Every structure is written in structure tokens, then in C-alpha cells.
Amino acid sequence: MEKPTLKPKCPNFSSGPCAKRPGWTVDALKGALVGRSHRSKEGKARLQEVSDRMKKVLNLPEGYRIGVVAASDTGAVELAMWTMLGPRPVDIFGWESFGKGWMTDAVKYLKLPKVNEYKADYGKLPDLKKADFNNDVIFTFNGTTSGVKVPNLDWIPAAHEGIVICDATSGIFAMELDFTKLDVVTFSWQKVLGGEAAHGVIILSPKAVKRMEENEPEVSWPVPKIFRLAAEGKLKPGELEYNTVNTPSMLCVEDAIDALKWAESIGGLPALMKRSNANLAAFERWVEKSGWISFLAESKEIRSNTSVCFRIKADWFRKLPDEEKTKAAKKLTGLLDKEGVAYDINSYGKAPVGIRVWCGATVETSDIEALTAWLDWAYGTVAKEYSREAVK
């Protein structure tokens, strides 16, 4: 196949940190409150602004609290687990590396007496209907490393006895979430907003706040200081929104504000979801015509519209030993890296060998369309090389 000439304008297809919003330059940060305390009047105002803008774009229900915490989405999930779990059995659903990691934490480190683990392989979902909502429930809304999402929240009743913790980092701002069914929602700016890494965001329903406050004296394990949001057993007004436990980067805060302003300017949450869906649709048109690649997700309804994972289905590739499959896939992605066409699109290390491309709202559909031609070229180049090797 002849090498394409049209390249994506932005070759950044990493699944985190993800591409910045269209038109972003470092000038977006020129108003950042650098060299100032986050506890100053101005610092608190910036943190309050980022909290308020997130609430507005997400259209959070009345009474839900939202704030910045340490250690990205991972820190936000851990915070919820370490401060809220214990009173009830826990049902945990995992079908890729991060969801299964929450199982490890619950069993090995928190040593909870009753943990029900529901697992599925990459590309599949476990049976969500097995959830017992008299228990606490933990699940990942979108599997970043598998390209598999929860299709909807119909399986969660509006009224439930336990708390529902949702790791939504690569799904929020791109997929429909009924927050009234969720008690804890976690994410990081570095995914769909294209923000900077290291900071997590946690959303708490009134029920989750109550659990955090009431559960603090009951936990039987040490709770790190950065997890202790409910000082003296009470999550006071402002303690989450602008008075953070740890010191946030005011550069990152400014960048998040910029991303949220952009989201508002294009039409808010509906526009963000529309952009992600258009990008996935471009991939779907390409895959339908392709003879060498397919989605890792086993069905359309669970196919992610942000972290899109592919497997190479060509016969010659499937017959390779596992180690050689990895080498072949890296040759393919390496060609695109060398050409400045696509960076960081290798599949996640623990996932099946293949390709993973971020197509969230900050990515332009025209760049996805340009990329597909280059993917075909890179595949053809690698396939030809292996064909010559087979003849020798």
C-alpha cells in the first residue's frame, strides 16, 4: 500500500494524559496563580471555580459535593474505599486491570471479611445483574485498558441500601451517567478533558458524605492523611470544594478551568459526547471495511467511545507466538510514531496485544479519519515483512 500523505494535525492519541483541547497553547495558562498559596483568597476562588464549572458541565444533582483530591483517579477511588467501606459486604466488578485492582485492595490490603468478586476477561463484561444492592458496590464505568464500557445504569435501582462507587475516569464527560444512582464518582482531568495528570476528582452524594462521616470511627485500618476529608468526623462546607487536604498545582487547576470553558463554549456535555461518538463512528466505518482489525469489545453496546481497543485478527498474526505478536504490534505502532502520525497507541501492557487509540472529545474526527489510512499502511508494511520472513 502506498504511504498516505495526509497526516493527523494532532498525533497525540495517548489514553492518558490525553490530547489537549483543540487550539490549546501554553498561553491558556498565563493567568495561573503560580507562586501563590492555594489557601489564599484568590487560590480558594480558583479551586471553587473549577468545582463550580465541573458541577455545571456535568449537571450534578442538588446536594452533591465535588472536589480535587490527590493521586489522580486512583487516589480518588482509594480514598472512597478506605474511608467508606466496612459496614456492609462489597460486590466488586472487574473486567480489566484497574477494576481488578480494586478487588486486590479490598481483599489483600483492607482485608474486608466479605467481598464478592465478579470478573470477566478483556473484551467482555461480567454479569452486572448479580449485584446485590443491600451491599456496597464498586465498578468501573469504562475500562480504559479494555475498551469496554457499561452500556447503561438500568441495573442499578434508584433506591439502594449500600453505597455505589463508580470509577468513571475515562467515561465521564463522554457517556451518559445518571448521577442519582451513584454515590461516589471518581475521575481525573487527564482523560476526556485533556487536562494535566496527578490530580483526582471525587463526587459525593449526600448519602456518601453521611457514610464517610459516620464510618470514620469504625474503620479498623490506618487512614492516610490525604484521605481524611471528614476532619473531626464532619465534611464541612468548602472542605472539599476549595480547602483541599493536599496542595494542588495551580497550573493544573488553571488548565482544568480552560478545558471546562472550552467545553461550555462548544455546548457543554451534549457536545462533548457528540464529539466522542463521532470519533468512534469514524473508527466503526473503517473497521467494517477492514480485513485485518477488529474491536476488542465483543459487542457494539459495550464498545467504548473514548479508549478504543483493537485486536489484530489477520490469520498470519494470530498464528504467531505471543512474544512475536508483541514485536509485530510494536513494529506497527513504531512506524506511526516515527512518521509523527500517532504517538502512544500500544495496547496496555496487561491487555491482549493490539492497538489502543484515544478518541475522546478533545480529538478531532478528521484526525481519526486520517489516522485510519496510516494504520492500514503500517499494517501492510509489517505484514509484508513477515511474509518475506515466512518465505525464507
Image (cartoon, rainbow, N blue to C red):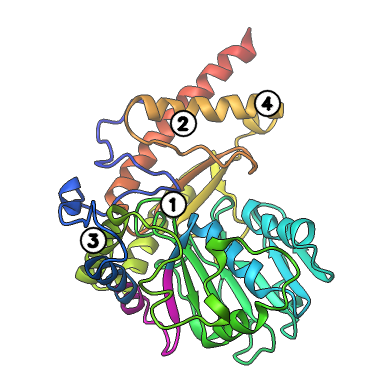
Look at the numbered disc 2 and give the secondary structure of its residue: helix
Q: Name the residue under label 4.
A: 323
C-alpha gap between disc 2 and disc 4: 16 Å
Q: Name the residue under label 3.
A: 258
Q: Quadrant of the C terminus?
A: top right
C-alpha gap between disc 2 and disc 3: 31 Å
Whether residue 234 appears in this view of the structure is: yes
As for residue 55 lying within the magenta part, the answer is yes
Crowding near pointer 3: few (<14 within 10 Å), some, many (20+)?
some
Front one among 32 and 182: 32
Whether residue 303 appears in this view of the structure is: no
Q: Closer to the camera: disc 4 or disc 3?
A: 3
Q: Mark 1 points at which residue?
A: 198
Q: Residue at x 54, y 54 (%)?
A: 144
Q: Type of residue at label 2?
A: Thr
Look at the numbered disc 1 and give the secondary structure of its residue: loop
Q: Closer to the camera: disc 2 or disc 3?
A: 3
Q: Which of the two labelled residues, at mark 1 and mark 3, occupies the earlier sequence position?
A: 1
Q: In this view, does 73 lie to the left or right of 5?
A: right
Q: What stretch is highlighted in magenta?
A: 53-67
Residue 383 image offset from top left, x and y in percent: 53, 24
C-alpha gap between disc 4 and disc 3: 43 Å
Q: Mark 2 points at which residue?
A: 333
Residue 22 image offset from top left, x and y in percent: 23, 53
- Using the rendered view, name the quadrant where residue 95 is placed: bottom right
Q: Closer to the camera: disc 2 or disc 1?
A: 1
Q: Which of the two labelled residues, at mark 2 and mark 4, occupies the earlier sequence position?
A: 4
**Does the residue at mark 2 contact the one at mark 1 (Cβ under 8 Å)?**
no
